[in-house]
Image: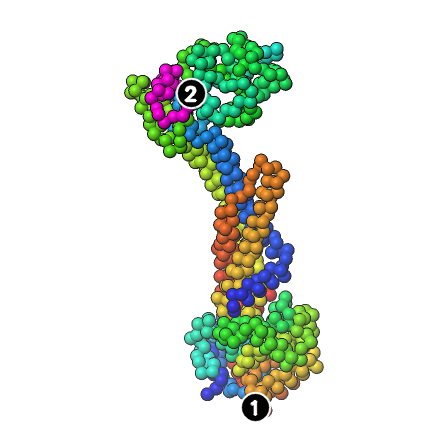
Amino acid sequence: MALIDLRNINKVFMMGDEKIQALNDVSVQINEGELTSIVGTSGSGKSTLMNILGLLDLPSSGDYFLDGTNTTSMNDDALSLYRNQKIGFIFQSFHLLPKASALKNVEMPMQYASAYNKDLTDEVIRKLALESLEKVGLADRVHHLPNELSGGQRQRVAVARALVNKPKILLADEPTGALDSKTSEEILRLFQDLNKQGVTVIIVTHDNHVAQSCRRILRMSDGVIKSEEHL
Amino acid sequence: MMLKKIFINSFEALVENKLRSMLTMLGMIIGVAAVILLVSVGTGAKRYITAEFESLGTNIIIIQPGKTDKKSSMGPPISSSKGKITLSDVDAIMRSSQLLSAVSGVMYGAGTVKYDISASNIYIMGSNDQLQKVFNINIIEGNYISKEDDDAGRRVVVIGWNVKENLFGKDSPIGKLVKINESEHRVIGVIKPTGDKLGFNVDEMIFIPNKSALRLFNTDKLFGIRAAAKSRASLDDAVADITEILKERHNGEEDFTIITQVTMMDSMNTILNMLTYALGAIAFISMLVGGIGIMNIMLVSVTERTREIGIRRAVGARQSDILKQFIIEAVVISVSGGLIGILISLFITYALFFAFPGFDMRPPFWIIPPSFLLSFFTGLIFGVWPARKAARIQTIDALRYE
Ligand SMILES: Nc1ncnc2c1ncn2[C@@H]1O[C@H](COP(=O)(O)OP(=O)(O)OP(=O)(O)O)[C@@H](O)[C@H]1O
Ligand SMILES: [Mg+2]
């Protein structure tokens, strides 16, 4: 059974009277452990698809089975739980809390997780957050605020945050879009390592090099997956 | 997320936005301080007036001619032409009631008192020997009017302290003759400096026997009777006694009004409570303004922090987590403001008390828990709407918010 199973997903935005069909009957399956990239022209619906995959947004119609459960019938609390436990999301613009240190940013998902898991005491949370930051190579930057970090370091804080609850899926929407090629390479390597450890990784990218380093490439255009490639 | 953690986060958020937090708190500080200060003024005034009344003794019975509404008996004594109280009424009460420790008719008017120099507009009080007991009049030199003085209507006078100082300076006035409205009276006593008592400044008064006063003012109508019950417990019975005695003497008609300390204090209390409530209501409005201030800032804060809300939701915060977060922030602001307001109002009232001990507006302790709770609930109530707004923002919209 596929970890991710999208069936006939449509997403329509209303701009006044105008209907925008951002996703048009998208069906795709992604198995556990895959490393997938999504490419396509600007406006082709990549981010819209990722937001739905990440349960940040709901499809207008269609079914999304995640880990065997149909998410389209879940209530908001259940969706929050899934976002917290099963999915790590990485954004092009990092989306770190600007007034919280790297450590606090990484601790945040675990604080919400502690509602479900009583083992997550303050000490455990701190310990796991430090470990996670160490894994992304930021052990010496834990008390820095985001604006005291470089772009690459910020994205690594975001990766540490996305991974801290040990999600099955890592979704990255143009994670290297704001980074130079050297830093992009580092982030990409991080994703590949994670994938080797069993995390299912999906990367939206405009960077051909990034796309080519994934085993599976989905090409989107006008709200549909036009083709796919296996390397 | 655990409540404790949310509290810590809220404090951190407040510290991060020091200026804004302070300004928001200011409304609550002023609101709570106003509540406490205004209630303190109310209770302070009440305490002052009650003490003043009680210093007179709580057993006093005031009988006035004419039927007046007991509820509005605070004003000056009204003598109506209808009822008429005479010295024989006083004698009858004195004879018949076992429950009274003292009874005196009273008669008053203004006049001129002359020794070497003259003092005009002196308040002249006619009384018998027992008024001293009714009003706790303390004599510093000589004696008060005696029963014989009153029975015989002797031309004697007991003078207040200021009158003595004005007319005699340091000399002893005892035995000296003064002219009261051209009629000569012998000074037999001086009253200890007393100040205000039941609306009169005793120091500026003189006391003469009732009969002398009636003669002086050329009338047979007394202004009223003042009596003291033997005990507070017998006050009501004493009033009933007097009512019966006077009614019988006045052809069964109740053409007089009896006021006791109790009824006076009751109507006084009604007025003072109303004052306290009115002040409380004003204070409540300032709380309301403080609460609206909090709501306003929280709404701004929610808008400003839309992206933060999106981020938190993206990593797994439930709507209820966001709701709690913003409500707790509002409560933390309002409670902090409330506590500061309590401290400030305590500081002000105690500072005033130590600077001017006569000006005791220290708040009663009971006001502190409710004002604390008031600030708590203000934060809660005015925090709910912004917090709901925050919780209901769609995750993706919040993340995209610029
Ligand atoms: N909230 C929205 N309201 C209205 N239209 C939207 C909204 N989000 C996306 N769209 C539209 O949906 C289409 C797909 O947008 P999407 O962001 O998914 O593109 P994309 O492939 O991620 O592009 P890019 O590579 O530039 O990020 C676009 O035409 C966009 O204008
Ligand atoms: Mg996009």
Which is more foreground, mark 2 or mark 1?
2
Task: Work out whether residue A176 or residue A97 is closer to the camera in this orientation and state it.
Answer: A97
Task: Work out whether residue B174 or residue A60 is closer to the camera in this orientation and state it.
Answer: B174
Q: Is mark 1 within 8 Å of ligand 1?
A: no
Q: Label 1, secondary structure: give it.
A: strand
- From what the image shows, is residue B306 above or below residue B138? below
Where does residue B66 sit, x and y in percent of width and height?
Answer: 37, 21
Quarter holding the C terminus of chain A?
Answer: bottom right
For the point 60% across and 65% down, which residue is it? B402
State the extent of the magenta-drawn residues as a range.
Answer: B80-102
Task: Work out whether residue B272 or residue B280 is closer to the camera in this orientation and state it.
Answer: B272
- Dividing the picture into quarters, in which one does residue B104 lie? top left
* Residue B378 can be seen in this image: no
- Dividing the picture into quarters, in which one does residue B83 lie? top left
Residue A32 belongs to magenta span: no
Q: Which residue is mark 2?
A: B104
For the point 37% across and 15% down, which residue is it? B88
Farthest-out residue, bottom: A231
Where does residue A168 sit, x and y in percent of width and height?
Answer: 53, 82
Q: Label 2, secondary structure: give it.
A: strand
Task: Work out whether residue A169 or residue B177 is closer to the camera in this orientation and state it.
Answer: B177
- From what the image shows, is residue B184 above or below residue B93? above
Q: Which residue is mark 1?
A: A230
